[in-house]
Structure formats: C-alpha cells, structure tokens
Image: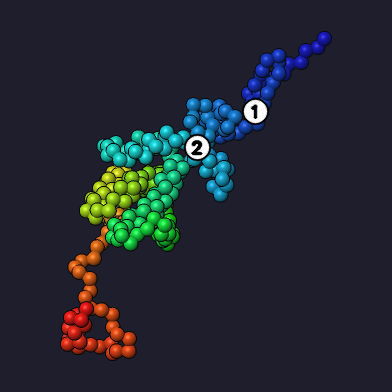
Amino acid sequence: MAYVSIESDDRMEEGPEGLRFQSFLGTDARATSDATGPRNDSGAAYGSDRPAPGGRFWNLDYYQPYFDVDTKMVLKRCYSTLLPTSSSYLSTHLTPSADLYGPFWTLTTLIFALFVCSSLASSIAAYLSDPAGSSPTDPIEYDFGLLSTAVGLVYSYGLALPVLLWLGLRYLGVGEWSVVEAIAVWGYGQFIWIPVSLLCVIPVALVRWILVGLAFLISGYFLVANVYPILASADAKAVRLIIILLAILHAGLALCFKVLFFSYYAFKEVGPKDPIPAPIPGEESTTTAATLLRRILSS
C-alpha cells in the first residue's frame, strides 16, 4: 500500500474522523457572528430581552422590537416621569432600549381624555348654570371638532416636534440620542396631562388653573432635564438656546389645553330679569325714554 504525503493547508480545519471543513465566511462576517453571539429561534441574542430589529424601515417587522414591551414596564416608565430625579431618564428607564408603544399609548389616551373630560366639563357647567331648565332626558351634544383639534395638537407636539428636533440636532452634528429615544422622552413626558384632564372636570376655575400650572411645571422640568444635556453636548454653545424655544412651545401647549378644553364655567344670571317687555308688533323699533317708562309702569 502506497502512502502519499499531503501538505497541510492553513485555510482548512480538521474535524473529527479526519473530515476537513473549509470556511466560506469572510473575515468580517465571522467577526460579526462572534460579536453577536448565539441567537435563539426568534432572532434575539441569548440574554437579550427583545428580538433584534430586522428588515427595512418601511416594513412592519422593523418596528416590532419597539412595541415588544409589557404593561408593567410601560406603567413604570409612565409614573417615573412624575418623580423628578437627578439621574437621566434615558439611562435609568429607557435602557437597554426605548420603545414606541408607551409613547403612542400615552398620547392616544391623552387625546381621548381631553375630549371626554372636556365634554363632561361642558355638560356640568351647563347644568350648574341652569339646573331648573335642565332635564335628564335632554340630549347631550358633543363637539367633535374638539376631538380633531386634540388629535392634531397632541400628535404634532408629541411626535412631530421630537422628530424635527432630532433631525435638527443631527444636522448640527449632535448624535447623542436616536429618534426613538426622542419620541419616547416626549411621549412619556406628556403622561401627567392624563390625570390632570380628569381632575379638570372640577367646575372651579382656580383649581383648574392650579392643575394646569402644576402639569406644566412637572412635564416642563422633565423635558428640560432630559433634553438640555443633549443640547449641551454640541460644540456650538448657541445650540443650548433651543431649550428656550422648547419652553415657549411647552407653555403654548399648556395654554391651549386650558383655553380649548377647560374653559367651561358655570354662570348665573346677574340681577333681576329685564323689566322692559317685548316691543309691540307694528311699533317702531326706536323708543324714547318716555315710552320706556310708560311700559315699565304698565307692566
């Protein structure tokens, strides 16, 4: 039996039973595979809480990981915005990754809370203004224009504004956060307006102004505490002045909520009823003082 000497190839790896396997993966592909580690059936790395994003951004599968959160986590991220802390909300509550379900749920719930509570406040004000003339069988007329107003106002401020801010900061060379984190900060920051909308049903003007002021301060402090460090990381110092514009927009939002949705007040007729009777048919509309006095005495 003849034996042939075969030189070893560095590119070949010898396996069990004399089998040889050759890797067709490039160096970059193998490095990426080693860095990501093994993955489970859902495509997520072992030890990760959610699957890795896949597909293109115009496909729904790309956004699935950002909605893969449970109710407990969303509620925790909501009420954490009510407790001012020295630590960053991004690093404390939006780690390891931010979500889009919580902000969308918060903003949508706020829209319906504004519409429903505003309609309820309107009906309470109408009843308190004229309880004798009100009847339980009277139909309640809803102003659905308020619903469309709430949709445009809340979604523009909670979704469009953070996206525009993120694009502007990217243009200025500030890339400290992602667009998902920007939307998450703004969306969760509006959670305070949901309980305030429920409490603003109270038909007392002073109480409503106090509640709106508290919501403005709490949510405003939350946004400034989390946005200003991002602005401060820019090389140009003038970028920090954007926080003034954001504060003005936030104050405008609070004022719009108060004026558009909670400006219903109970009113009563002041003084006695008008003693002047209705004009006599066929008589001139303009009357002299003597005619008015005669009508008063005759009545």
User: From where the camera sits, is residue 118 visible?
Assistant: no
Query: Residues under labels 2 and 1: Cα distance?
Result: 36 Å
Could you tell me the amino acid type at mark 1? Ser
- The residue at which mark 2 appears reads as 68
Q: Residue furthest right?
A: 1
Q: Residue furthest top?
A: 1
Give the mark nearer the N terminus: 2 vs 1: 1
Q: Residues within 10 Å of mark 1 (few under 14, many from 20)?
A: few
Q: Which-is-in-front pick, marks 2 and 1?
A: 2
Q: Secondary structure at mark 2?
A: loop
- The residue at which mark 1 appears reads as 23
Residue 162 coordinates in the image, percent (x, y): 39, 51
Residue 213 coordinates in the image, percent (x, y): 25, 51
Q: Residues within 10 Å of mark 2 (few under 14, many from 20)?
A: few
Nearer to us in this view, 242 or 222: 222
Nearer to us in this view, 86 or 265: 265
Could you tell me the amino acid type at mark 2? Asp
Q: Quadrant of the N terminus?
A: top right
Q: Dividing the picture into quarters, in which one does residue 21 lie?
A: top right
